Image (cartoon, rainbow, N blue to C red):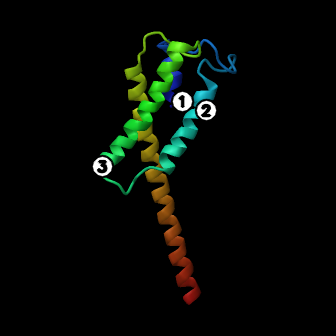
Amino acid sequence: MCIFGHAVVELQLLAYPVRELADVSRTSFTYEYMAYPMTCAVFNAYYPSHRSGWIQFGYYVLFTTVLTIGEVLLVQYTDLIRYVRWNWFWSWATIFLTFLMTRAFCVIYFGTMTRVETAKQKNAASTTRS
């Protein structure tokens, strides 16, 4: 999300009038570097990979929609976020896209790690037999 968050702020589509570390970044530090990464971790840790495609799609939609509703409430009732040339749909779409990207990364990375560990275990087993 960090890449999209920075691009959106730099293009002045979205503004964070109140933010932490205002001298360092114009994005929301709490959201970009803490809340969203933790949400992605939970999303991937509990991803229903052995369920049907509809359940998996619903999982994406659920997480994306909850985050978007939270953002819309922050826009309407606080000064933490201000839509300049932005709306809830673009937030929903970019959040959905980043969930797809983080899921693909986890599948590739942890799939590779699983294959490496399996190969190590097989190698160790064959070494002890010799």
Could you tell me which residue is drawn at 37 percent across and 22 percent down?
89
Instruction: Tell me the residue that label 3 is attached to.
Output: 53
The residues tagged by marks 2 and 3 sit, at their Cα atoms, a distance apart of 30 Å
**In the image, residue 39 above or below residue 20:** below
Q: Residue at x 54, y 44 (%)?
A: 41
Secondary structure state at the residue bearing disc 1: helix
Give the x, y percent position of residue 115: 47, 65
Q: Decide which of 2, 80 is in the foreground and name it.
A: 80
- Crowd rating for badge 3 (residues with CA inside 10 Å; few <14, some 14–19, many 20+): few
Query: Callout 1 environment at 10 Å: few (<14), some (14 to 19), or many (20+)?
Result: some
Q: CA distance from mark 1 to mark 3?
A: 28 Å
Helix, strand or loop status at disc 2: helix
Q: Amino acid at mark 3?
A: Gly
Q: Looking at the image, which is closer to me, 54 or 111?
A: 54
Image depth: mark 1 or mark 3 in front = 3
Earlier in the chain: of badge 1 and badge 3, it is: 1
**Which residue is identified by label 1?**
2
Quarter of image, res 79: top right
Circle nearer the viewer, 2 or 3 = 3
Screen quadrant of the C terminus: bottom right
Q: How many marks?
A: 3
Callout 2, which amino acid?
A: Tyr
Residue at (59% x, 33% y) in the render = 35
| Residue 33: mark | 2
Tell me if label 2 and label 1 are in contact, CB under 8 Å.
yes
